[in-house]
Image (spheres, rainbow, N blue to C red):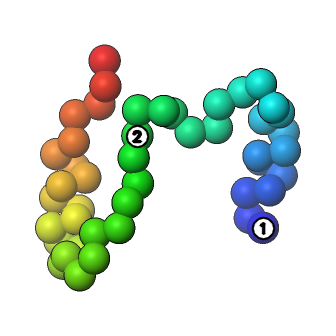
């Protein structure tokens, strides 16, 4: 897989994805709406 080497280099004690992010399905939403939603997200502080 494309990311296998990267994941293997990280090791067991590291975090690969930040726990404050979520990825989910957006069903049949138009891509323009999804893009706007993503661009307007605030980064956690």
What residue would you read off at disc 2? Answer: 21
The picture quadrant where one finds residue 36 is bottom left
Residue for point 51% across, 33% down: 18
> Against 17, is 27 above or below?
below
**CB within 8 Å, label 1 to label 2:** no
> Against 41, is 28 above or below?
below
Q: Residue pushed farthest bottom? A: 28
Image x and y of residue 12, in percent: 81, 32
Position of the N terminus by quadrant: bottom right
Residue for point 48% across, 33% down: 19
Image x and y of residue 14, in percent: 72, 27
> Against 35, is 28 above or below?
below
Of 4 and 19, the residue lying toward us: 19
Q: SS for tag 2?
A: loop
Q: Residues within 10 Å of mark 2 (few under 14, many from 20)?
A: few
Q: Which mark is residue 1?
A: 1
């Amino acid at each position: 897989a494309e990311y296998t080497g990267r994941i293997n280099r990280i090791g067991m004690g590291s975090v690969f994805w930040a726990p404050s992010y979520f990825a989910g399905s957006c069903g049949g939403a138009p891509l323009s709406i999804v893009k706007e939603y993503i661009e307007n997200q605030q980064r956690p502080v």
